[in-house]
Amino acid sequence: MSVRRVLGHYFAVRDNLKEARFLVAARTPASFNPDSGLEELWLEHERIARGRRCDDNCTRSFLDLKIEIARRIFSKCSLCPWMCGVDRSVGRGHCGVGDPHVASEFLHHGEEEPLVPSHTIFFAGCTMDCVFCQNWDISWDPSAGRYIPEDELASVIEERRRDGSANVNFVGGDPTPAIPYILRVLSRVSVNVPVVWNSNMYMSGDALGLILVVADLYLTDFKFGNSDCAERLAGVRDYFEVVSGNHLMVSSEDMIIRHLVLPGHLECCTKPILSWIAENLGEETVINIMAQYRPLYRAAEHPDIYRYPSMAEIREARRWALKLGFENIL
């Protein structure tokens, strides 16, 4: 099956043949009381997500409901596996993000071909602490850039779409800490534009639940084939369990999986990841085997990754993918 068919929903929205999911969510009726408890709000969320109709007092939308749940979570944050539980209006958790800062936004021509030109919005801060991060200047500095009022960013998204953007691409760092803000921004966008969720996928079930039925395509990173490498090189716990589980949660969605080939990590990371994807998500999954690794930031502290991947390693990664039967390698 071709990339266009596998990513059929995304292409249809990109080409204005179908409505973006956030617009559908904004006109899907919902009934909830802002004074209700968070558990009750999640029950209403699940009811609507399963397609049950709102029968009475439906004065709000599914997107409104997501925004209200996100507001509650912001005051006791559970958006990533760190589960800091902090009120981010007055304190900071592991990611260090309060009101999200946009480090940059522009029409990006360097993404995967189906996404170009992509209106990329880079958020400062991240849920992971990769020692080789190529965007370390914003990932490790949540204060980079500036806070942009929701109405202003919504206007920019609309203008970029009129200028020919194929999508709006939320990235970072990682966009997960910015979910409450992103939902509010989207509630102010009126043009039809596909939403790309460009994430390391080290996020909680709460976070993923809020993004589901909002994102039109998941552009994911799958870096480590085991949790030991992830803890040593990215400072996170239970990486493989969390990230593989989140990929399963969006397995029915349009998705492109990126895998950055780390030097010396073919056997422990690259091959196990590709094998897992083939077995659990299928050979039609669109994957991008990336050779862009550079020994930046604090990579010098780890001799096993303080070099460029060799051409032999890149060729072996692609050979393994072909051996597994992948049909859509970008």
Image (tube, rainbow, N blue to C red):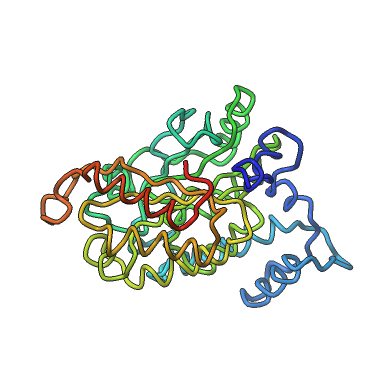
Q: In the visual, does 296 lie left or right of 151?
A: left
Q: Nearer the viewer, residue 322 or 37?
A: 322
Q: In the visual, does 122 lie left or right of 190?
A: left
To which quarter of the image does residue 293 belong?
top left
The relative height of residue 174 versus residue 14 in the rendered view (above or below) is below
Which residue does the image show at 69% across and 46% down from the upper left? 9
The relative height of residue 163 versus residue 168 in the rendered view (above or below) is above
Residue 107 at x, y = what percent?
49, 28
Q: Residue furthest right?
A: 55
Q: In the visual, does 170 lie left or right of 14?
A: left
Residue 317 at x, y = what percent?
34, 51
The total number of labels drawn is 0
Q: Residue furthest front?
A: 323
Which residue does the image show at 39% across and 46% down from the upper left? 289
Q: Nearer the viewer, residue 266 or 325?
A: 325
Residue 170 at x, y = what percent?
50, 44
To which quarter of the image does residue 162 belong?
top right
Q: Nearer the viewer, residue 233 or 85?
A: 233
Residue 1 at x, y = what percent?
63, 47
Which residue does the image show at 79% across and 65% down from the upper left? 51
To which quarter of the image does residue 34 belong?
bottom right
